[in-house]
Amino acid sequence: MKKWIDLRSDTVTNPTDKMREAMFHAVVGDDVYEDDPTVKELEDYAADLVGKEAALFVPTGTFGNQLAVFTHCKRGDEVILGEDCHIIAHEVGAAAVISGVQLRTLETKRGMMNLDKIEATIRPFEDLHWPETGLICLENAYSDGAVPSLEYMKSVKSIAKKYNLPIHLDGARLFNAATNLGVPASEIVKHVDTVQFCLSKGLCAPVGSIVAGSKEFIIRARKNRKLLGGGMRQVGFLAAAGLIALKEMTLRLHEDHENARYFAEKLKEIPCIYLSETPIDINMVFFKINQNKLTDEEILDLLLEKGIKSNGPEAGYWRFVTHYWISKEDIHYVIEVLKKILE
Ligand SMILES: *Cc1c(COP(=O)(O)O)cnc(C)c1O
């Protein structure tokens, strides 16, 4: 099989050999009966790892976020969140369809909303006309590759506490954020009530996310997961890979971050390439290609001919994502190909 260099996302990561082995040998049972020991092990391990009482295995990050919104809120509630976060930008309007909530978006800078604006946006029960604020959603790492600070997380928590509001964290790349901040993931998660994180992105598991929170929350979330059609049977096969994702793959993410910075250094050497000014916090490099010779589609086709997959630019910026299956040699190769295409 042809080896592709796939820079589109870290979602393209295939499972490792060790994961395939663990999946083959996994002890499984009917998880709707809570009879699957491997799922139990994963959920217990995940809850401990992020410092929450309980956790639940769900099929995807989108499922996990929407399940959290659905479990926290009642219909007509308002949810405060960043205007360009994943729940707004990439979840098909699910919060409106599933939970019937109203999303109240605020501008973000490097993944952070203005704290005064958050507080000014919260609407209590009193006024007859107002929807009630039901939830604040944060995202860390943010979809644009930025890692909001612990200070920010702490400040949002103190606002939420004042108004007795829950916070849900979309932590699809939680362990990338923790790696960047140099803290255990629990140091980020302690500032929120619930968290969703993906096992399937840079951590290489084939499928799955975790939702973690209080025991009481997870009991209700388990029932809502069933309602949404996410009660899965012998799903320990996937949990087996998820355990390796959490125990081992979380420890190597710094390699992807180093490779992203290395990529940036090399891209800089190409005359028509301009890197985004924002620092590289995780495994993503953003850049512009300023030339008139080729269209974006032509560049993509030429890359593809050389075995390199990339998405086209979004809002003018190209994004390369590093991950387990992208080595230093791959980076050198991509740089050589780009130099030839663009010279
Ligand atoms: C990928 C991602 C998700 C959703 O994950 P899926 O498994 O693709 O549904 C949610 N939030 C963020 C920030 C993501 O990057």
Image (cartoon, helix red, strand yellow):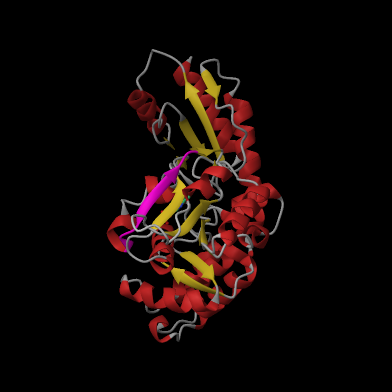
> Would you say residue 121 is visible in this rendering?
yes
Residue 24, position as x, y percentages in the image: 47, 73
Furthest residue in direction right, as rendered: 182
Instruction: Tell me the quarter of the picture where residue 232 sits.
Output: bottom left
Q: Is residue 184 left or right of residue 126?
A: right
Instruction: Tell me the quarter of the picture where residue 33 sits.
Output: bottom left
Q: Which residue corresponds to the image point at 64% horizontal and 51% vertical from the top-left?
A: 155
Q: Is residue 22 left or right of residue 301?
A: right
Q: Is 269 placed above or below 178 here?
A: above
Q: Is residue 298 left or right of residue 318?
A: left
Q: Which residue corresponds to the image point at 42% horizontal and 26% vertical from the top-left?
A: 316
Q: Which residue corresponds to the image point at 48% horizontal and 34% vertical from the top-left?
A: 319
Q: Which residues are magenta?
A: 99-107
Q: Name the one closer to the observer, 233 or 3.
A: 233
Q: Is 181 placed above or below 18 here?
A: above
Furthest residue in direction front, as rendered: 127
